[in-house]
Image (tube, helix red, strand yellow):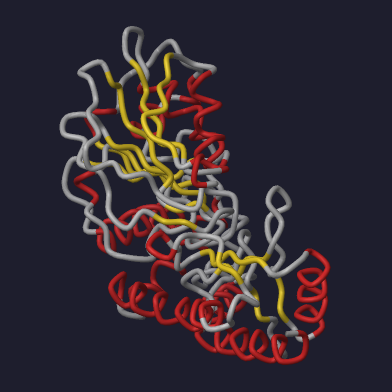
């Protein structure tokens, strides 16, 4: 079997070992004579998976006491609305940092639900940077500050996080969660769609400080964090298979050295490609400013769209998948999430060097 060089931005690469284990267990999970997709979510077998997956998150991220780990549905896009629905109260204002496509989507949803203020933006830099938040001052009426830790489309990442004092810091970490160590205690709420670093699509992880979980009786039942926290993410039928797969991915991360090892490996993988860009004499041009470059999503351009089209076509013929940039911005993008092998990045490095030789 020949595996593609998978650089898709999401749904994205999964560890081969995880896929093989899931394949082995697909028809008969743990000797129960059924697939895990067939069993009741109230069964002991699934409850064990649910608890173990939460515990793996707590262990890998060193989540302190006073936080809940929730498994929800609707993707990060649902969280764009659930966060202000649950946390933005009358008389308060939500603060947002505008860093690009996904930050803008979160901002647009919040504007439908209450008072919102954009406290910093990198729009004037064409979203190639992260704004300096070191002198940011938030009023006592600020309900929370929302950031997008890694912009999948623009290829920029926060290298440090702002100190918000008593104001809860909320982060969409869909595209870089579990890619590096993190001090969870600095955040009020973290959310992430699974389909990039955690597993297949279908489940969204929410890590929320318990004091932010309010009854919120004015909201539909399914849109309250309290509903899911009170029921251990089992209020309704959860996306059982997605959570099972996420469990396997978390085990894989643990077995491969945890988050410190993931960070080191991700930096090494990204460097292979960024070095080609920087050493190409302008043949390849990085989109993000170097100090804000994402190790998860490497964005770059070439002299013209015709050359970029040829790059995509030739890369596909050579077994590479997912190198076309997002439709909203064009260009090229290589997403090098945790599960993308080092060898795939080496292969892309060699392809890029060869392409430049032939077309430079």
Q: Residue at x 23, y 43 (%)?
A: 134
Q: Which quarter of the picture shows residue 284? A: bottom right
Q: Residue furthest front?
A: 281
Instruction: Find residue 47 and report its horizontal and vertical position in percent.
Output: 41, 52
Instruction: Find residue 274 and report its horizontal and vertical position in percent.
Output: 50, 76
Closest to the observer, 39 or 292: 292
Task: Please give left or right for residue 93 compared with residue 334 in the image.
Answer: left
Q: Residue at x 46, y 60 (%)?
A: 289
Q: Residue furthest top?
A: 91
Q: Quadrant of the N terminus?
A: bottom right
Instruction: Find residue 306 and report its horizontal and vertical position in percent.
Output: 83, 68
Q: Is residue 158 above or below residue 298?
A: above
Instruction: Find residue 89 and report its horizontal and vertical position in percent.
Output: 35, 13
Q: Is residue 67 above or below residue 252?
A: above
Closest to the observer, 259 or 327: 327
Instruction: Tally the numbered discs.
Output: 0
Task: Please give left or right for residue 256 compared with residue 316 in the image.
Answer: left
Q: Is residue 228 above or below residue 172?
A: above
Q: Quadrant of the C terminus?
A: bottom right
Q: Is residue 110 above or below residue 234?
A: above
Q: Residue at x 32, y 78 (%)?
A: 261
Closest to the observer, 124 or 206: 124
């Amino acid at each position: 079997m020949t595996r593609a060089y998978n650089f898709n931005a999401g749904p994205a690469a999964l560890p081969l070992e995880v896929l093989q284990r899931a394949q082995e267990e697909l028809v008969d999970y743990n000797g129960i004579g059924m697939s895990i997709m067939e069993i009741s979510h109230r069964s002991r077998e699934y409850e064990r998976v649910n608890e173990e997956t939460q515990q793996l998150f707590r262990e890998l991220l060193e989540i302190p006491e006073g936080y809940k780990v929730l498994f929800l549905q609707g993707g990060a896009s649902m969280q764009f609305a659930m966060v202000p629905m649950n946390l933005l109260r009358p008389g308060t204002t939500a603060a947002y940092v505008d860093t690009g496509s996904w930050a803008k989507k979160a901002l647009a949803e919040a504007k439908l639900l209450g008072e919102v203020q954009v406290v910093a933006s990198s729009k004037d830099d064409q979203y190639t940077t992260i704004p300096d938040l070191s002198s940011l001052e938030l009023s006592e009426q600020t309900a929370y500050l929302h950031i997008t830790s890694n912009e999948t489309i623009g290829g920029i990442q926060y290298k440090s996080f702002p100190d918000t004092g008593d104001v809860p810091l909320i982060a969409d970490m869909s595209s870089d969660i579990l890619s590096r160590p993190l001090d969870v205690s600095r955040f009020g709420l973290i959310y992430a769609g699974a389909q990039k670093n955690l597993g297949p699509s279908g489940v969204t992880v929410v890590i929320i400080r318990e004091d932010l979980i309010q009854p919120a009786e004015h909201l539909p039942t399914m849109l309250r964090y309290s509903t899911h926290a009170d029921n251990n993410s089992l209020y309704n039928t959860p996306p059982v298979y997605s959570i099972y797969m996420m469990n396997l991915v978390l085990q894989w991360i643990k077995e491969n050295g945890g988050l410190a090892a993931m960070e080191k490996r991700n930096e090494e993988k990204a460097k292979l490609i960024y070095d080609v860009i920087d050493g190409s004499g302008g043949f390849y041009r990085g989109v993000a400013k170097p100090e804000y470059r994402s190790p998860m999503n490497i964005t770059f351009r070439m002299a013209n769209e015709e050359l970029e089209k040829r790059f995509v076509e030739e890369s596909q013929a050579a077994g590479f998948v997912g190198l076309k940039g997002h439709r909203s911005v064009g260009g090229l993008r290589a997403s090098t999430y945790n599960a993308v092998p080092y060898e795939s990045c080496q292969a892309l490095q060699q392809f890029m060097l060869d392409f430049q030789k032939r077309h430079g």
